[in-house]
Image (cartoon, rainbow, N blue to C red):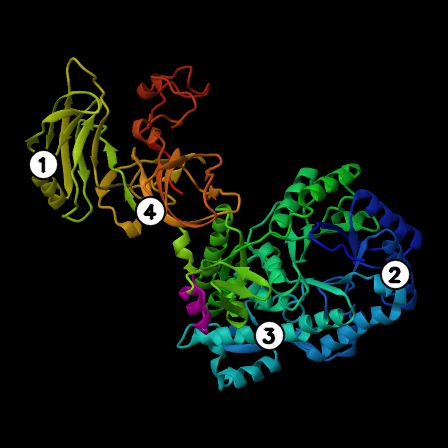
Amino acid sequence: MEYTGNCLKLLSFWAINGELKLSALKGQLEEMKAMGLRGTVFHPRYYPGRPAYMSGAYLDILSEIILYAGQLEMEFWIYDENGWPSGSADGHVLEHFPDSRCEWLNYRNGEVVLEGKAGFNTFRRDEMAYFIEYTYDGYRKGLSEEAFSCVTGFFSDEVGFLDGHGVSVNMGGIPWCPEAEEVYGQLRGRKLRDDWKLLFTEGEGYEEVRLAYWKILGDILSDAFYKPVNQWCEAHGKRYTAHLKGEETLFFQTSCSGSLYQNLKQINVPAVDALERYPGNHYYPRTVSSLSRQFSDGRCMAEALGGSGWGLSPADLENYVDWLAESGIDTIAFHLWQYQADSASVRDWPPNIPRGLSWKDAASAVFGKLYRKWDNRLHKPRPVLLVAPERGVQAQFDPADAIALNEHNGSGTPDSRSGKISRAFSRFAEHCYEQGIPFDVTSERILEEHGHVEDGVLRIGKAVYSAVICGDGAWFLEEQIREQAKAAGIWYEAGEWQWHYTGHGGNQILLEEKECHIPWRGCEDTEGEWRIRSLDPLEGIRAGETQLIGEEKEGNVVYTIPDSVKKSFLKNGEISLRWEACPEGENAPFVYLEGNFGVKSTEGFREKDRHQWETAGDFYLTDIREDEVDVRDLCASGFPFCRTYVEMESLHFAGADGKLRFDKTGLHADCMAVMLDGDTQLRYCWGPEWELAGIKQGIHRTVIRLIPSTFNTYGPHHHIDGDRHLTSPMQYSGEKGFADAPDAPSFTLTDKWHFVKFGI
């Protein structure tokens, strides 16, 4: 039984943790069906062996259960292990190969040493062949013929290097096996032992050594386990699904399996393990939906919500499924459904979904809503391909850095060369998602070995792409496919899709004191006019020893600083200004120095809250260097008082819905003006949507003018709360009033400056 087509398949991950009783098992299948689940993954887990695992009695009961699931029109998947990870055959592999060892390299006292322990070994082809014979052939021969024909497929869990427990994350080591050493010699024409120090240290040729070795390890794992299991399943008309450990990031996956892409490419229903209660990144679920679109039929799976806890609500579950489904995953197995609800099961990576939850009676309504939302909407075109720098990460991978990782979700990626490449790509994938770019992902190797350009598009297997964006740090061994894509005009670098500063509409600094001596820390030939702008007439103003003459412009009084005076300021490294208020006029006028310069704080900026920065000053001026402007933080980059705009450029993709979406992550501005493809027409957008409608589908060269909060011009900059939702005249003088918080001090001003965040 299999649900086919573009529909959502919600399954239980059925933890068989008690004695097999036919009536109880059938009753729980009926519960699942009534709740709206479309199938189950039968998972022996802390199984007590009554009857014995894989015994005749065990398989006889399972046959009846499978047939009953078929009568209920439910998918039935078999988890291929008793416990996890897969590959041990409930300990029988090690019983059959009692001398089996897991071995790895480590770096101690300046030397590479070989270490090991007893255990089944996924690098051993004979051991994995025995695992297939014991488990897969065991089910084929032991189940009734009719029951076996009703099995949807088989499920493997966290098969990685050696016995699945990462030696890099736990010990800072690197997996080893005799075959890897032999293949290295054949591939490189050198002995591994002459080079293996470069797996841990940087020396001449270390990148090539690491690339070769991690490729060899990943290929052995793929050839010994994933490929033959998938071949067995397809030979017997079965689906095969599996997830690795460490899918979340490129850095994490290197330590666990070398290459996610190369291993899961072998599988007809590739899967990921999605832990915890809240959605993760938008990279790793797309790895498997992309691989399935490219090399299979689009079906892919997630083992979902493991360890999400007893606080999981219907809203949490719906949000989580939406995240996975939007990424193209059509089959979701909820971890776990506990067969026996005892005290131990309460603590076993809870919760029991949905059977053990307080809202179980609402489950059918929750699942029904999800089916209505996602059926026939899962497999959508994704015409853009991101190339993940998998090799780039491997070439710089130092296993000692992996110890910092959280081995459950991969958080804690280090600030090493390899870690930086991995984190940068993860951020870029999120940026693409937030921009609304419909993307798949691949690796450098997949692209080289399976990609070809034809009729102006790139094809990988069954998938077709009209644009290819290469992640920073990617490492190519062949240039042909890149050159073809460039010639077709469909190749882009990641940097082209990220904002780059191109200019500004004028900058300023508030001259708060009547006499100002502002340091200049720039070059002596900065171009552009400088002027003083006052909202009110002044009694007088001097720039150095030069008395300035004002003229009224746009309701303000403007005093132009002579170029000779400006040059002397730049040469001397200080801007000296003095102004006097009119005796009969405004005694605290707003006066600004305007020009082409950056305003920096010697103390830097710290976050006051999610909305604002705070700094003690003092401020100095400098020239604006295009390559030094961080568009994510324009206040720190020299524009804290800006009242006009900062301009930047990037490529953008408008989807089939005609919308151009801007990445709202870290977007701090009042609004933006947008110009497309060289057209000077300004289109405006603002939050919370930050999108333009009515745009032609495809790629657009986009220039934006980011417009800051007016608070940054007028303040009150020194009020203890900065930008409050209610602002009165007293907040400029410091007298506590009704607009202040009840617990505010009697005098509400501080020496510190406050600015609303500005950047994208």
Depth check, mark 4 against mark 1: the one in front is 4
User: Judging from the image, what secondary structure is the residue with disc 2 in?
Assistant: helix
Indicate the position of residue 587 as horizontal and vertical percent values: 20, 18
Q: Which residue is mark 2?
A: 62
What residue is shown with label 3? 219
Q: Magenta stretch?
A: 472-487
Q: Amino acid at mark 2?
A: Leu
Q: Residue at x 47, y 80 (%)?
A: 195
Tell which of 597 and 367 is nearer to you. 367
Spatial CA distance of label 4 from label 1 is: 35 Å
Residue 246 lies, with reference to residue 202, above or below; the image says above
Q: Please report whichever mark, 2 or 4, sits nearer to the chain's N-terminal start.
A: 2
Q: Nearer the viewer, residue 476 or 718?
A: 476
Task: Point out the tag, 1 or 2, that comes first from the N-terminus.
Answer: 2
Secondary structure at badge 1 equals loop
Which residue is at 86% across, 56% downward? 70
Q: Is residue 707 magenta?
A: no
Residue in view at x 67 percent, y 72 percent: 227
The local secondary structure at tag 3 comes to helix
Which residue matches tag 4?
Answer: 678
**How far is the residue under mark 2 from the one under mark 4?**
66 Å
Circle 1 is placed at which residue position? Answer: 562
Instruction: Report the side of 238 relative to 499 (left or right).
Output: right
| Disc 1: CA contacts within 10 A as few (<14), some (14-19) or many (>=20) | some
As shown in the figure, which amino acid type bears the numbered disc 1? Pro
Name the image quarter holding residue 101: bottom right
Q: Check if residue 486 falls in the magenta segment.
A: yes
**Res 427 visible:** yes
Q: Quadrant of the N terminus?
A: bottom right
Q: Amino acid at mark 3?
A: Asp
Q: Are marks 1 and 3 in contact (CB under 8 Å)?
A: no
What is the C-alpha distance between the residues marked 2 and 3?
A: 35 Å
